[in-house]
């Protein structure tokens, strides 16, 4: 059994989608970051940087209990453990998945979160910052659109890389920017949104 430490944010949904797609048994443990539960001393032992998501696998390698934070590391771990192809065993396929998984967690989400902070949530609006992060987000959606023009999913078959990129595409691409200028992203987004595992991951917990 895997415990998933979760809150309803982009990175939280990445891990929950990964768990749902893996088919592995898991239990959701909510960490309400608005109430600063991520700073609880017991939780800091699992996630030293006070971030969600994190997991504890009570049956990790060698039957040992292991904990893991960082959505990218979590997605690789559960994808590998699932063995159902969402993190492929083939080294060449892995290279493509790793490239887009790191793009998703290090580049896309990190910058999309800045857009969310300054263009959506901040009560104070500073137009140059909003213009900057809007241009950055549009540029990343254009990058994704070019990639998806001749690839069904970012790394070929559906994988943890798509799972890493989907939540901010949904939250900020669909809801804030709109996907009219990015038809390949629209097609990709809608096909992922229709997956039963994704609907379950984004549903009540
Ligand atoms: N690079 C990390 C980022 C995780 C992250 O930013 N988590 C946010 C929610 S989306 C969080 O827990 N914030 C609470 C805090 O920083 O105290 C990952 O991919 O998991």
Image (cartoon, grey):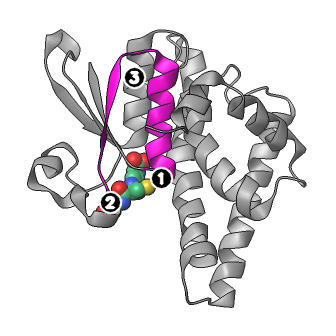
Determine crowd level at label 3: few under 14, some 14-19, many 20+ residues with C-alpha closer than 10 A: many
Of marks 3 and 2, the one in the foreground: 2
Q: CA distance from mark 3 to mark 1?
A: 19 Å
**Among the 4 quarters of the image, the one containing residue 147:** top right
Dot placed on the residue nearer the N-terminal end, 1 or 2: 1
Are the residues tagged 3 and 1 within 8 Å (C-beta)? no
Dot placed on the residue nearer the N-terminal end, 3 or 2: 2
Helix, strand or loop at disc 3? helix
Q: Is residue 194 left or right of residue 33?
A: right
Q: Which residues are magenta?
A: 8-33
Residue assigned mark 2? 33
Q: Residue at x 38, y 14 (%)?
A: 81
Could you say which is closer to the camera, residue 78 or residue 149?
Answer: 78
Residue 24 is a magenta residue:
yes
**Residue 173, percent from left and from top:** 72, 55
* The residue at label 2 has a CB less than 8 Å from ligand 1: yes
Dot placed on the residue nearer the N-terminal end, 3 or 1: 1
Could you say which is closer to the camera, residue 19 or residue 138?
Answer: 19
Task: Name the quadrant where ligand 1 sits.
Answer: bottom left
Q: Residue furthest left?
A: 41
Quadrant assignment for the N terminus: top left
Helix, strand or loop at disc 2? helix
Residue assigned mark 3? 78
Residue assigned mark 1? 9
Please determine whether, in this image, residue 148 is positioned above or below residue 196: below
Q: Residue at x 44, y 26 (%)?
A: 19
Are the residues tagged 1 and 2 within 8 Å (C-beta)? yes
**Residue 41, percent from left and from top:** 9, 54
Q: CA distance from mark 1 to mark 2?
A: 10 Å
| Residue 159 appears anywhere in the view | no
**Residue 15, percent from left and from top:** 44, 36
Q: CA distance from mark 3 to mark 2?
A: 23 Å
């Amino acid at each position: 059994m895997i415990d998933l430490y979760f809150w309803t944010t982009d990175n939280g949904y990445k891990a929950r989608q990964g768990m749902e797609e893996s088919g592995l048994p898991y239990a959701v443990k909510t960490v309400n970051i608005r109430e600063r539960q991520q700073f609880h001393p017991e939780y800091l032992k699992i996630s030293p940087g006070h971030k969600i998501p994190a997991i504890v696998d009570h049956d990790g390698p060698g039957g040992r209990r292991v904990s893991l934070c960082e959505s990218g590391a979590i997605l690789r771990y559960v994808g590998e453990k699932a063995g159902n192809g969402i993190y492929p065993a083939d080294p060449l396929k892995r290279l493509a998945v790793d490239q887009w998984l790191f793009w998703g967690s290090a580049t896309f989400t990190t910058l999309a979160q800045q857009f969310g902070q300054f263009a959506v949530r901040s009560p104070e609006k500073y137009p140059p910052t909003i213009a900057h992060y809007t241009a950055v987000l549009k540029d990343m959606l254009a990058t994704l659109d070019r990639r998806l023009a001749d690839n069904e999913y970012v790394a070929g078959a559906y994988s943890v890389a798509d799972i890493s990129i989907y939540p901010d595409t949904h939250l900020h691409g669909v809801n804030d920017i709109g996907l009219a200028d990015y038809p390949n992203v629209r097609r990709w987004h809608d096909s992922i949104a229709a997956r039963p595992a994704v609907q379950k991951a984004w549903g009540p917990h």
